[in-house]
Amino acid sequence: MKRMLIENQVLQLQYKRGYGAWTYHLVIPNTADIPGKWGYLKVSGLIDDYELEEMNLAPRKNRDKIISINKDIRNALGKSAGDTVTVTLYLQTEDW
């Protein structure tokens, strides 16, 4: 079962040097209270017209969760740090 997290929300592509796989990421608003540990929270949806399938929603203690935006996705979108994207995401976890 999928649950809508955000729909057609404009978010800014974040850059944090030395942040590993999450150097480029999106902060997903209103997700701080979703329980789950690393690897448990999967999302799917769209970033602009790019389809995401089963990406990890990375937990952060008492903060909104993030998804990493790798080079392949950034290149397909033609976007980089500071650019905005329109995001629709569904949580694929039934327990929430």
Image (spheres, rainbow, N blue to C red):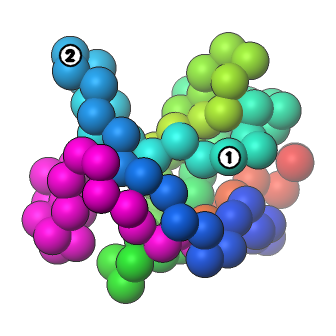
Residue placed most toward the observer, 88 or 58: 88
Q: Amino acid at mark 1?
A: Pro
Q: Quadrant of the N terminus?
A: bottom right
Q: Is residue 62 visible?
A: yes
Question: What percent of the width, then of the height, locates residue 36?
Answer: 73, 31
Residue 83's image quarter?
Answer: bottom left
Looking at the rendered structure, which numbered label has been put on residue 18? 2
**Mark 2 vs mark 1: which is more N-terminal?**
2
Which residue sits at x=30%, y=48%? Answer: 82
Q: Give left or right: position of 54 versus 82.
A: right
In the image, 1: left or right of 72? right
Tag on residue 29? Answer: 1
Magenta stretch encompasses residue 72: yes
For the point 20% across and 63% down, the residue is: 79
- Residue 64 position, x and y percent, is 66, 33
Instruction: Classify mark 2: helix, strand or loop.
Output: loop
The magenta stretch spans residue 71:
yes
How dense is the environment of label 1, judged by Cα within 10 Å: few (below 14), some, or many (20 and up)?
some
Mark 2 and mark 1 in contact? Answer it, CB < 8 Å. no
Residue 51 point in image, percent of width and height: 39, 77
Above or below residue 50? Residue 91 is above
Q: Residue at x 67, y 74 (%)?
A: 7
Q: Amino acid at mark 2?
A: Gly
Q: Which residues are magenta?
A: 69-88
Vertical side of 95 occupied by 86: above or below: below
Q: How many marks?
A: 2
Q: Quadrant of residue 32 in the image?
A: top right
* Residue 34 position in % (x across, y down): 80, 37
- At label 2, counting other C-alpha atoms closer than 10 Å, the crowd grade (few under 14, some 14-19, many 20 or more) is few
Specify the label residue 61 is tagged with. Answer: none
For the point 19% across and 53% down, the residue is: 80
